[in-house]
Amino acid sequence: MTSRRDRKGRPIVAVTGIGLVTPLGTGKEDNWRKLTAGESGIRSITRFATDGLRTTIAGAVDHVFEEGMHSAELSEKLARLAGTEAIAESGIGSKGNFPGPLFLAFPPIEIEWPQRFAIAAASGANDRIEYGDLVRAAGDPKFRPFYEASKYGVVPDNLAEHFGTQGSPISLTTACASGATAIQLGLEAIQRGECEAALAIGADGSITAESVVRFSLLSALSTNNASPESASRPFSKNRDGFVLAEGAAALVLESYDHAVARGARILGVVEGVGEKADNFHRTRSSPDGKPVISCMQKALADAGVTPEDVDYINAHGTSTPENDRMEYHGVSTVFGERLKDIPISSNKSMIGHTLTAAGAIEAAVSLLTILNQRIPPTINYQVPDPAIPLDVVPNVARDARVTRVISNSFGFGGQNTCLVLTGEPAA
């Protein structure tokens, strides 16, 4: 068999398995049906008391959450669900024996308020804890399970053991670009010839009282509490912030030759990737848009394609006033006159912003768009912003010829990653 290579002589990297969990449900089929139906997974928060909070809505995965779970436990469970589905579809390896490394995008782990208050009360400090309190808590049977689950590196080790991945697992966080970065690392490992397959997962189960308060203090969250389903309004004139959400996605990445040799179904190809950090501000993007422009240009160049070759843009589309405006500036610069003929939509209008998992989830949805030749809509698009003249797919899914997608992920701290995804590679 002749080896299939990309335009740069590298191994073509195929996707042979997809797993997906969002506020809409568990499993890619259920999620795809609801996404293309324009359903919203945003609801009022019931997991904890919201009295006095400016924002009381979120895209919580309450169908997965178990009472008493802290965010690290929930994130790990989401990763397991998505990874299990992706590996099962791929049919690669055997149960507990995945023939490649794990690249995990995972949120930072910290002591959460309930545990912090309990440790403080146990130490007699009431409202504060010292390092010594943490050390003592590690030996206390009551706190030991939380301590063990919260140690850095525990979750990726747990997942590596569960899936039987090879070598040391890589755990990373590049803010809201993390999920796409995990796919990038898996892609590059295969291109370098380090492995024939890799498991890339992005997971985030971080809807806690503390996270809602923190993002509220940044004035980043929508306060449309009276109508949760219509709170996320990307590219609309009346957008007022993003909606915090949870979820996970997993992709089995595999060299095309390896996948074909074992008779695997090719779900798509990761054709190129671009990354660019701007270091402009801890949360704000550079107002000139140069980092995101460069990121998209690098992704297209890495794939060896031009703006003319792109059929659909899966936008970062957070629904914050600044981000949507910045993204429009970026795509209009990169695609120029071609932009008016490229449909664009934001999955976050239905599932909210899943933070660490967002890039992986949106890559999975982009692949499903290519497979089904149907573009999920941007719901709640009732009042277009005249300053953002895009071909937004409004409110109802659109059947379209989609061969190639660029999926954008722009994170806090200026951490930006863009993926170019396509179907079967050209002969």
Image (cartoon, rainbow, N blue to C red):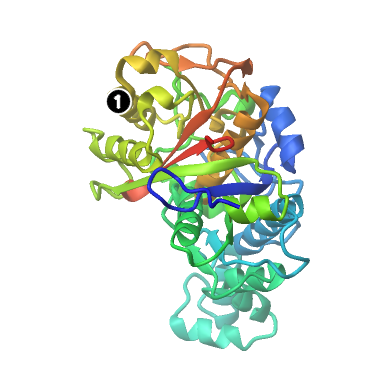
Write the residue at 54% across / 65% down: 195
Provide residue 10's location: percent of width, then percent of height.
43, 52
Q: Which residue is mark 1?
A: 329
Asked whether, in this view, residue 319 is left or right of residue 114, the answer is left
**Quarter in which the C terminus is drawn:** top right
Q: Is residue 49 above or below residue 36?
A: below
Count of marks placed on residues: 1
Write the residue at 39% across / 28% down: 324
Provide residue 170's location: percent of width, then percent of height.
50, 67
Which of the two residues, 358 or 344, is positioned nearer the viewer here?
A: 344
The crowding category of the residue bearing disc 1, from other C-alpha atoms within 10 Å (few below 14, some 14 to 19, many at least 20), is some
Provide residue 344's location: percent of width, then percent of height.
48, 22
Q: Is residue 185 above or below residue 427?
A: below
Asked whether, in this view, residue 360 is left or right of residue 276, the answer is right
The answer to whether any part of residue 127 appears in the image is: yes
Which of the two residues, 414 or 6, is positioned nearer the viewer here?
A: 6
The answer to whether any part of residue 248 appears in the image is: no
Identify which amino acid the numbered label 1 is placed on. His
Q: Is residue 366 above or below residue 262?
A: above
Write the residue at 74% across / 43% down: 27
Q: Is residue 185 above or below residue 422?
A: below
Provide residue 145's location: percent of width, then percent of height.
67, 77
